[in-house]
Image: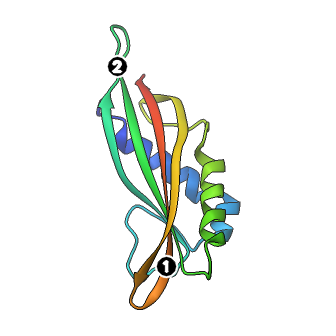
Amino acid sequence: MTGLANNPLQKAIYDALAGDAPLIAKVTGVYDEADEKAPLPIVVIGDGTTVDNSTKTEDGQTHTITIHAWSSAHGRMEVKDIMGLIYDVLHNSSLTVTGHSVVLIRFEFSEDFRELEDERTINHGVMRFRAITEKI
C-alpha cells in the first residue's frame, strides 16, 4: 500500500459520484477520462494536486480535485444542476479511502462557461474540492 492517498481518494470520489442515483439519472456517465464520443451530459474527474500536510505525529496530505461537468443542452441550467448534484455528493461527505481517513472534503469554487466544439455550443462546468487525508 502506498503512503499517497491520491489514487484511493480518486477511487472513492468516483464511487461516490457513480453511485449517486440522482446524479446518474441526470448524466450518461462518470469518467476518469471520457471517450470523446461519450454522449453528453457527462461528469469527468479532472486534474488534482497532492501536497504534504503532515504533523509531528500524523502523516497527512492535502488534495485538490477538479471535477468537470459537460452538457450540450440549450442554456446553462443543466450544467448548473449537475454541479449542484456533485456538490451534494462530495461536500462534507464521509468517503471511505483505503489506508487513509478523510478528515474533510469541501467545495472550493465552481465556474461555468461556454465552449464551441465542432460548431456546437457546449456548456462546461468546473468545480474544485479540497480534501485532507491522514494515513491510518
CA separation in Å, label 1 and label 2: 42 Å
Residue behind mark 1: 122
- On screen, residue 68 above or below 13: below
Q: Amino acid at mark 1?
A: Ile
Residue visible at 57% across and 55% down?
17
In terms of sequence position, does the residue under pointer 1 or pointer 2 come before the other?
2
Left or right of residue 25, residue 120 in this image: left
Residue 106 location in percent, x, y? 55, 37
- On screen, residue 135 above or below 17: above
Residue 37 location in percent, x, y? 41, 83
In the rendered image, which quarter contains the C terminus?
top left
Residue visible at 34% across and 18% down?
54
Residue 91 location in percent, x, y? 60, 42
Residue lying furthest bottom in this view?
119
The numbered disc on residue 59 is 2
Q: Nearer the viewer, mark 1 or mark 2?
A: 1
Q: Amino acid at mark 2?
A: Asp
